[in-house]
C-alpha cells in the first residue's frame, strides 16, 4: 500500500530565504509522486510531478523536488520564498502499479507554509 | 483556472437532507475523481469514474453515491446528511488513469 508522510505540519520562513518542505513516501511499486498547493479558499493546483524520468523535477513558480529512492523522500524546495507562496502544500502519491490500477491520489496531511516579511 | 468546473460553490442544508454536487471535467478528460477535505480527516479519495464506469471506491459512505454521464460530467449525491458531512468536496479529472489530475474549485457543504 502507498502512503506519504509530511514531516512538518507548519514551516515558517522569511521572504527571500529558502524553502524546504519534507515528504517521505511508502510504495510497493515505482511511485508517481506529486506536490499540490492550496491557497486559502482555493482549489488544489499541481506544482510538479515525478513519474520515473529525471529525479530532479522542476515545477511552477520556481519550485522543484528531488526524488531519492534510497531515502524514500520527495522534498520540495524553492531558493527564495515570496509572500505569495504562503499556502498549504500537499505531498501526494498515486495509487498506481499492480493490479486494479486506478490512479487515485493519496494525500499527506499537508504543510502550512508561512512567509514572513 | 484548471478547466474543471464544480457547482454549486457553496451549499448550506439541514441534517437529513439530500444534495447533489456537479462536476464538469476538462475537455477531453475521461477520468473523474471525487475527494473530500475535512479538518479531521484531511483530503480523502471517495470514488473514481472512467468513461462512464465506476473504477475505484475509497472511503465513501453508503449514503453517498455518484455517477458519470455520457457527456462525462459527474454528480455526487449525498443523502441523509449529518453534521459530520460538512466538508469541502473536490472533483478532479485526468485524461487517462494515472495521469496528473486537475482539480476544480470545490463545493463547500455546510450541514446545520
Image: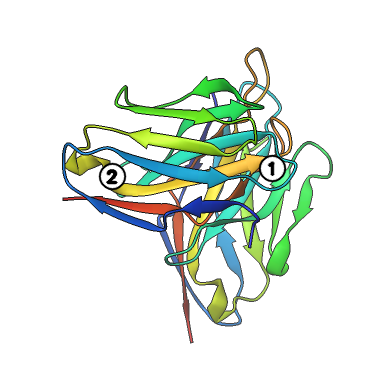
Q: Kindly indicate the quadrant of the structure image that contains residue A112.
A: bottom left
Q: Which mark is residue A6?
A: none
Horizontal side, residue A61 vs residue A54: left or right = left
Q: Is residue A106 visible?
A: no
Q: Is residue A83 visible?
A: yes
Dot placed on the residue nearer the N-terminal end, 2 or 1: 2
Callout 2: 10 Å neighbours few (<14), some, many (20+)?
few
Residue B106 position, x and y percent, is 46, 53
Query: In this orientation, which residue lies closer to the viewer: B97 or A38?
Result: B97
Please give the name of the residue rendered at 48% of the width and 63% of the height, measured from the top-left corner: A42
Asked if labels 2 and 1 share a chain, the reply is yes
Please, which residue is most extreme toward the bottom here? A117
Callout 2–callout 1 Cβ contact below 8 Å: no
Residue B56 position, x and y percent, is 53, 22
The subunit carrying tag 1 is: B
Query: In this orientation, which residue lies closer to the viewer: B45 or A4?
Result: B45
Helix, strand or loop at mark 2: loop
Residue holding disc 2: B40
Helix, strand or loop at mark 1: loop
Residue holding disc 1: B100
Please give the name of the residue rendered at 53% of the width and 45% of the height, measured from the top-left corner: B23
Q: Kindly indicate the quadrant of the structure image that contains residue B17.
A: top left
Front tag of 2 and 1:
1
Query: In this orientation, which residue lies closer to the viewer: B5 or A103?
Result: B5
Horizontal side, residue A77 vs residue B39: left or right = right
Residue A18 position, x and y percent, is 61, 72
Please, which residue is most extreme toward the front here? B70
Please, which residue is most extreme toward the top here? A99
The subunit carrying tag 2 is: B
Residue A5 position, x and y percent, is 48, 41
Please give the name of the residue rendered at 28% of the width and 44% of the height, measured from the top-left corner: B40
Callout 1: 10 Å neighbours few (<14), some, many (20+)?
many
Amino acid at each position: 500500500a502507498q502512503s506519504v508522510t509530511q514531516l512538518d505540519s507548519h514551516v515558517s520562513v522569511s521572504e527571500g530565504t529558502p524553502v524546504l518542505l519534507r515528504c517521505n513516501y511508502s510504495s510497493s511499486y515505482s511511485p508517481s509522486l506529486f506536490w499540490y498547493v492550496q491557497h486559502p479558499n482555493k482549489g488544489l493546483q499541481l506544482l510538479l510531478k515525478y513519474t520515473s524520468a529525471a529525479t530532479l523535477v522542476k515545477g511552477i513558480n520556481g519550485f522543484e523536488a528531488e526524488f531519492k529512492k534510497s531515502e524514500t523522500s520527495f522534498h520540495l524546495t524553492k531558493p527564495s520564498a515570496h509572500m505569495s507562496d504562503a499556502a498549504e502544500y500537499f505531498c501526494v502519491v498515486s495509487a498506481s502499479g499492480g493490479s486494479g490500477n486506478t490512479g487515485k491520489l493519496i494525500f499527506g496531511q499537508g504543510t502550512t507554509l508561512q512567509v514572513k516579511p | 483556472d484548471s478547466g474543471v468546473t464544480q457547482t454549486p460553490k457553496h451549499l448550506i442544508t439541514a441534517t437529513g437532507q439530500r444534495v447533489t454536487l456537479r462536476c464538469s471535467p476538462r475537455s477531453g478528460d475521461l477520468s473523474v475523481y471525487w475527494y473530500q477535505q475535512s479538518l479531521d480527516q484531511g483530503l480523502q479519495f471517495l470514488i473514481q469514474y472512467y468513461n462512464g464506469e465506476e473504477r475505484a471506491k475509497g472511503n465513501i459512505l453508503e449514503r453517498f453515491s455518484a455517477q458519470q454521464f455520457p457527456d462525462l460530467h459527474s454528480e455526487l449525491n449525498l443523502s441523509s446528511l449529518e453534521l459530520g458531512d460538512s466538508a469541502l468536496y473536490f472533483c478532479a479529472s485526468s485524461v487517462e488513469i494515472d495521469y496528473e489530475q486537475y482539480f476544480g474549485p470545490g463545493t463547500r457543504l455546510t450541514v446545520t
